[in-house]
């Protein structure tokens, strides 16, 4: 029997376009969340908004696996760019995940998950590869969707796809100082969000494959607050829908 695929986002704008693709969704409320089950491109799927932050994301993931028998989990949404060259409008596919605010030292090394002996949680290799192929398709398509004025207003260049480390923590990184501190602490980090590493930890506990794809909405610096709603509406939601649709076709 094929595994049920869970598709998760933190914000409604990130998931709405994907949800609109489902022809037969059924709603169910569990744990204060609405879960939509149905089918997309021949796959049995469940969609849900996790809410923002690691606790909300972890609780949602546990419900997806325990109550909805999800066999694979894909997180789609936005993130802040950290590494040089990871720019607004680019897409980052998670190759690994670290909780940048996990620090139980001196009992355990900084970033290590207490009692688990690991710091970096890997993405499922198959999901990561499929998400990368889907993202590469999406970035070639976006400039055809938006006119030149909109692209310039949003500060978008020629979008690119990156694959590597995503770091997560329970704060919205939005100053130059915070961004610089993260780059110094985790030099290989490509992007920062508030959920991916928490979802990765729960998926590891249950032996479930996890993949994450993040559209870069800002550079996690003093300009991180600029026109975020417009970016969600005109860029991120379209990316999410196209990447998820392409991913399901490839799986």
Image: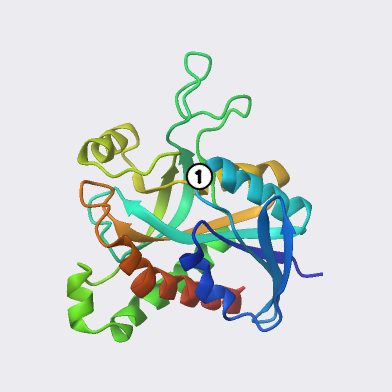
Q: Is residue 116 or residue 73 the one in the foreground?
A: 73
- Where residue 184 sits in the image (x, y, percent)? 27, 33
In the image, taking residue 180 as reference, residue 191 lies left or right, namely right
Q: Is residue 52 visible?
A: yes
Instruction: Tell me the residue at 33%/84% (across/down).
Output: 145
Looking at the image, the residue that sits furthest to the top is 106
* Quadrant holding the C terminus: bottom right
Q: Quadrant of residue 42?
A: bottom right
Which residue has dot 1 on it? 53
- Where residue 120 sits in the image (x, y, percent)? 50, 38
10 Å neighbourhood of mark 1: few (<14), some, or many (≥20)? Answer: some
Q: Is residue 44 visible?
A: no
In the image, taking residue 81 as reference, residue 126 lies left or right, namely right
In the image, taking residue 147 as reference, residue 126 lies left or right, namely right
Total labels: the figure holds 1
Instruction: Tell me the residue at 50%/49% (across/down).
Output: 52
Q: Is residue 7 or residue 106 the one in the foreground?
A: 7
Give the answer, above or below, for where 201 lies relative to 79.
above
* Quadrant holding the N terminus: bottom right
- Is disc 1 placed on a helix, strand or loop? loop
Coloring basis for residues:
rainbow
Instruction: Tell me the residue at 50%/44% (across/down).
Output: 53
- Where residue 79 sits in the image (x, y, percent)? 38, 54
Instruction: Tell me the residue at 24%/58% (across/down).
Output: 226
Q: Quadrant of residue 234?
A: bottom left
Give the answer, above or below, for where 30 lies relative to 241.
above
- Where residue 173 sits in the image (x, y, percent)? 33, 43
């Amino acid at each position: 029997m094929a595994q049920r695929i869970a598709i998760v986002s933190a914000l409604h704008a990130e998931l709405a376009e994907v949800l609109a693709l489902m022809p037969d969704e059924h709603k169910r409320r569990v744990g204060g969340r609405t879960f939509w089950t149905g089918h997309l491109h021949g796959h049995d799927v469940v969609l849900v908004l996790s809410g923002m932050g690691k606790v909300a994301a972890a609780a949602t993931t546990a419900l997806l696996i325990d109550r909805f028998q999800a066999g694979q989990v894909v997180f789609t949404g936005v993130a802040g760019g950290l590494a040089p060259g990871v720019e607004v409008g680019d897409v980052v596919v998670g190759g690994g995940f670290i909780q940048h605010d996990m620090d139980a030292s001196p009992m355990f090394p900084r970033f290590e998950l207490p009692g688990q002996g690991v710091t970096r949680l890997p993405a499922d290799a198959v999901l990561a590869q499929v998400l990368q192929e889907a993202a590469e398709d999406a970035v070639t398509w976006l400039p055809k969707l938006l006119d030149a004025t909109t692209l310039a207003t949003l500060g978008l260049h020629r979008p690119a796809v990156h694959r590597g480390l995503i770091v997560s923590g329970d704060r919205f990184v939005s100053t130059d100082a915070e961004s610089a501190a993260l780059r110094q602490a985790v030099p290989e980090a490509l992007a920062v969000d508030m959920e991916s590493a928490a979802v990765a930890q729960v998926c590891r506990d249950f032996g479930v494959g996890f993949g994450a794809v993040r559209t870069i909405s800002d550079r996690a610096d003093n300009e991180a607050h600029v026109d975020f709603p417009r970016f969600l509406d005109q860029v991120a939601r379209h990316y999410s829908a196209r990447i998820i649709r392409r991913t399901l076709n490839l799986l």
